[in-house]
Amino acid sequence: MTNKIIAIQGNHPKKLNPKTDTSIFLANEAQNKKYKIFYYEPKNLSIINDEVIAKGFFIKFNYFNKKFFKILKNQKLNLLKCKFILIRQDPPFNLEYISTTYILDKINNKVKIINNPTSIRNISEKLYSSSYQKFMPKTIFTKDIKEIKNFYKINKKMIIKPIHGYGGNDIHLIQGVFKNLLISKFIKKHGHIMCQRFIPNIKYGDKRVFLINGKISGAISRVPKKGSFLSNMSKGAKPILTNLTIFEKKISSVIAKDLKLKGIYFAGIDFIDQKLNGDINVTSPTGLKTYYDLSKINLAKFFWKGLKA
């Protein structure tokens, strides 16, 4: 019999910010629906005696307490006892991340896992956007410095990103003299990288679109702080409510339906100046708590309703 337990695979709660964190926001709504929350870190997931086991703890979240969580009980749990499992650890999408998807694949047909572990393993957040390049600024994915230099010569300014990066980390704006040494070191560190024509209108903000269960569910804009081109809130960007254009809605709808067919229940995509920026966030999409604070619309309710929780 399935218990009323929801497991969250994520970074330890002490590393989370309750003011903005989506995992806590989803867990809080699940608690309102009388679910118990079991929390574990990826390193504590195992296959023991042919069972998928996690060492973790039952936890209670409370937005009104200074310490926003309380660990109720440490436990080793057979994850087949859960009704849902949320994969919510931050990227990078490294070997540990990949290993956990293989382990969870073992029970994927017995427990609802969001997002589907096979799907998040197969959908590289940046490389997958190559399927939608007609909606994007000029972009290449390569580790060939001659190709990068030629791309830069044509586009004059460009952004370079690690393919498996996250949160606005290790992103560079290349302008002026081509920085051969910097890019060579960048390739040595990251392997294949993403190079994209710089869009100056990023100074007015990007748009983060929330896709839940194959539908557009809401959007916010994130305006970089003065002098920055990074729209991540972790880098100081200011979130505001926004509306999508007809074109942005059309693209978002196409991607939402595509992702649902591939087993992705919850995703986030970003636009800059009506161009898809190439980040298809499927590993640990964020922004629902911020959207609620700005709009008072609780997408966590919509999230759980779609799963019939």
Image (tube, grey):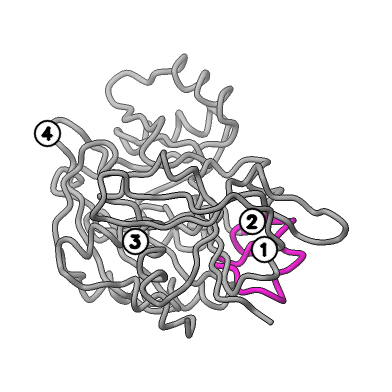
Q: Above or below — where is 94 with respect to 40?
A: above
Please tell me which of labels 2 and 3 falls first in the chain: 3
On the picture, is 230 further left or further right than 49?
Answer: left
Amino acid found under the numbered disc labelled 4: Lys
Residue 231 horizontal/vertical position (percent): 25, 44
Residue 69 among those drawn in magenta: no
Q: Nearer the viewer, mark 4 or mark 1?
A: 1
Amino acid found under the numbered disc labelled 2: Arg
Circles 3, 1 touching at the beta carbon (< 8 Å): no
Reading the image, the residue beneath label 2 is 121
Q: Nearer the viewer, mark 2 or mark 3?
A: 3
Amino acid found under the numbered disc labelled 3: Phe
Q: Residue furthest bottom?
A: 308
- The residue closer to the viewer here, 295 or 12, is 12
Q: Look at the numbered disc 3 and give the secondary structure of its residue.
A: helix
On the picture, is 262 further left or further right than 160?
Answer: right
Reading the image, the residue beneath label 4 is 226
- The crowding category of the residue bearing disc 2, from other C-alpha atoms within 10 Å (few below 14, some 14 to 19, many at least 20), is some
Give residue 118's mark.
1
Highlighted magenta segment, given as a residue range: 101-122
Circles 2, 1 touching at the beta carbon (< 8 Å): yes
Q: Above or below — where is 61 with respect to 248?
A: above
On the picture, is 102 further left or further right than 134?
Answer: right
Residue 304 horizontal/vertical position (percent): 42, 77
Please tell me which of labels 3 and 1 falls first in the chain: 3
Give residue 246's mark.
none
Q: Above or below — where is 80 with respect to 97?
A: below
Q: Quadrant of the N terminus?
A: bottom right
Amino acid found under the numbered disc labelled 1: Thr
Please tell me which of labels 4 and 1 falls first in the chain: 1
Reading the image, the residue beneath label 3 is 25
